[in-house]
Amino acid sequence: MTGCPASPVVRLWCPRDPGSVVDRAAYTGCPPNSGAPPGWDKDDKAEEVADACVGEAVGMERDEALAGVAHAVRIPEIPVGMSTAAVYPEPTAAAFALAAELGYDGVEVMVQTDPVSQSVDALSDLVQEYQIPVLSVHSPCLLLTARVWSSDPLVKLARSVDMAERLSATAVVVHPPFVWQRSAVATFTPSVAELQDRTDVRIAVENMFPVKVRGAVVNSYRPHWNPVAAGHRWFTLDLSHTATSRIDAMELAAQMGDRLGHLHLGDGSGSAKDEHLVPGRGGQPCAEMLDLLSRNGFDGAVVVEISTRNVAQEERETDLAEALTFARLHLAASV
């Protein structure tokens, strides 16, 4: 054999510097003494890969990493973003700064009470300042944001789509309306379809969960907290919500099929509380879901949406770095 093709770019996380993701054009899987492409030195590249902390990342000694460089991994072209909600109660600008520092591919803007999150101009300035794109916009559907932009969920959705278009984001995340939002309930499904026909932005309706009221399980969303039966063109699958609703996340992904256009990566223990744990710290099949998306042609984004509201800044940074590493690792396919 006179030569081996170079592998795709390899993206490696270094635990000495959790914010670094190092790109290496690794030349792997070739037998000893095989010829390398012109200008390429296999031993030097092996040194580069080892120096990029492959060994440390998998708990190996450096020499073992050198010997096992053929097992380096590649990352599919699935962007991994961070929700601005993941730094709440810190402001939107802090989320952009941290996402850029940690090496995320972009952010999902949760439109909330922070005026910056509501302003295309202010968000555009953050994109330029931190050189990180907006991947998606989350419509202001929460109780906390009940009067942001409007009290009408469909007005909120239309403004979210406009924001996404102006920021070159590819998706808008929206919840089914609450049961008391009667005007939106009556027309939500056809209104989403009509808006979708007018935009290239994916309007991805998110799976939610029932709530307990005086011990009884209540569906507080309409037509249902599980939006699949409504037949929307696109869905967001949220892994914290599957834990809270105690449904099979992999089965839900199968039901969504090629309409699964966006993933909220988090975890949960099955508590009635929507926990949004760091992936891997709960009972959801986070790794299996990422592996599925890496192999089934998924062309949306994976967005880390975890809760750090009750932790110190250092722990917040560590949790978000860990979540990013988890996503990179489990989206990886063997070269």
Image (cartoon, rainbow, N blue to C red):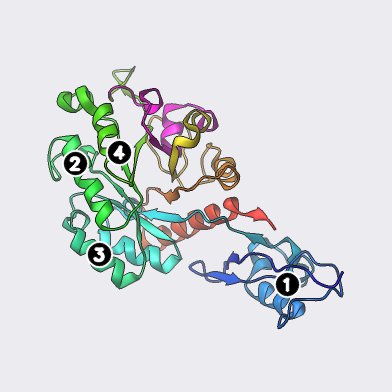
Residue 242 on the magenta segment: yes
Q: Residue 198's mark?
A: none
Tag 2 residue? 156
| 231 shown above or below 195 | above
Mark 1 and mark 4 residues within 8 Å of each other at the beta carbon: no
Distance, label 4 to label 2, CA atoms, is 14 Å
Q: Position of residue 202 (x, y in %)?
A: 35, 43
| Closer to the eye: label 1 or 2 | 2
> What is the distance, in whole Å, between disc 1 and disc 3 at their CAs?
43 Å
Hey, which residue is sitting farthest top in the picture? 216
Q: CA distance from mark 2 to mark 3?
A: 20 Å
Other residues around mark 4 within 10 Å, as few (<14) / some (14–19) / many (≥20): some
Q: Which labelled disc corresponds to residue 62?
A: 1
Circle 3 SS class: helix
Tally of marks:
4
Write the residue at 71% across / 83% down.
Answer: 39
Q: Left or right: where does residue 229 sit relative to residue 7?
A: left
Residue at 20%, 22% (x, y): give it. 186
In the image, 58 versus 105, the foreground residue is 105
Q: Quadrant of residue 295?
A: top right
Of the two numbered discs 4 and 3 in the rendering, the one whose residue sits closer to the viewer: 4
Q: Is residue 279 above or below residue 215?
A: below
Residue designated by label 4: 196
Residue 33 inside the magenta-drawn segment: no
Q: Quadrant of the C terminus?
A: bottom right
How many residues crowd mark 2 within 10 Å: few (<14), some (14–19), many (20+)? many
| Residue hosting label 3 | 124
